[in-house]
């Protein structure tokens, strides 16, 4: 089932998955288990993804290692957000 449209006033339900292949690398999805929205090459590099948590995001929410505005924008625009380890600028 696809998520309803996001507006800044309503929370967005999100789903976070950890990469088995890339330590401390997470994929945020707008729709649970919708891995088909990920680019094929990214999916191949990340390998199997393990569900970590479901969380409601709002622009006011603080995230420990990600900018919530960036996460929300990526989720709204493409349905996913890639969170890399702090030391990584790119994956590959």
Image (cartoon, rainbow, N blue to C red):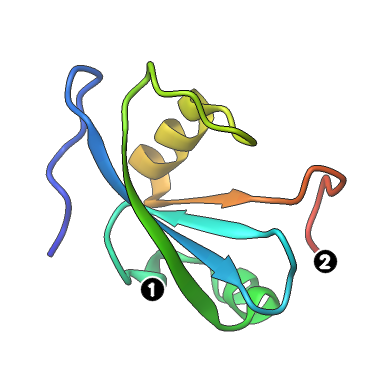
Residue at image coords 40%, 23%: 61
Quadrant of the image containing the N terminus:
bottom left
Task: Please indicate whether residue 42 sits to the left or right of residue 11 in the image.
Answer: right
Q: Is residue 52 above or below residue 87?
A: below
Quadrant location of residue 76? top left
Task: Please indicate whether residue 88 sits to the left or right of residue 20 in the image.
Answer: right
The residue where tag 1 is placed is 36
Within-10-Å neighbours for mark 2: few <14, some 14–19, many 20+? few
First in sequence: mark 1 vs mark 2: 1
Quadrant of the image containing the C terminus:
bottom right
Q: Position of residue 49 (x, y in %)?
A: 52, 76
Task: Please indicate whether residue 25 sits to the left or right of residue 52 in the image.
Answer: right
Question: Could you tell me how far apart the alpha carbons at marks 1 and 2 are, in whole angstroms?
Answer: 20 Å
Q: Position of residue 41 (x, y in %)?
A: 64, 74
User: Which label belongs to residue 2?
Assistant: none
The residue where tag 2 is placed is 92
Residue at image coords 25%, 19%: 8
Q: Is residue 67 above or below residue 49?
A: above
Q: Position of residue 87 (x, y in %)?
A: 87, 45
């Amino acid at each position: 089932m696809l998520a309803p449209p996001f507006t800044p006033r309503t929370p967005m339900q999100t789903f976070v998955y950890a990469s088995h292949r890339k330590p401390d690398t997470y994929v945020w999805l707008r729709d649970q288990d919708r891995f088909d929205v990920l680019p094929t090459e990214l999916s191949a590099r990340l390998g199997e993804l393990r569900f970590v948590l479901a969380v409601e995001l709002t622009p006011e929410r603080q995230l420990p290692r990600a900018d919530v505005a960036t996460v929300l924008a990526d989720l709204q625009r493409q349905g996913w957000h890639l969170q890399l380890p702090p030391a990584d600028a790119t994956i590959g």
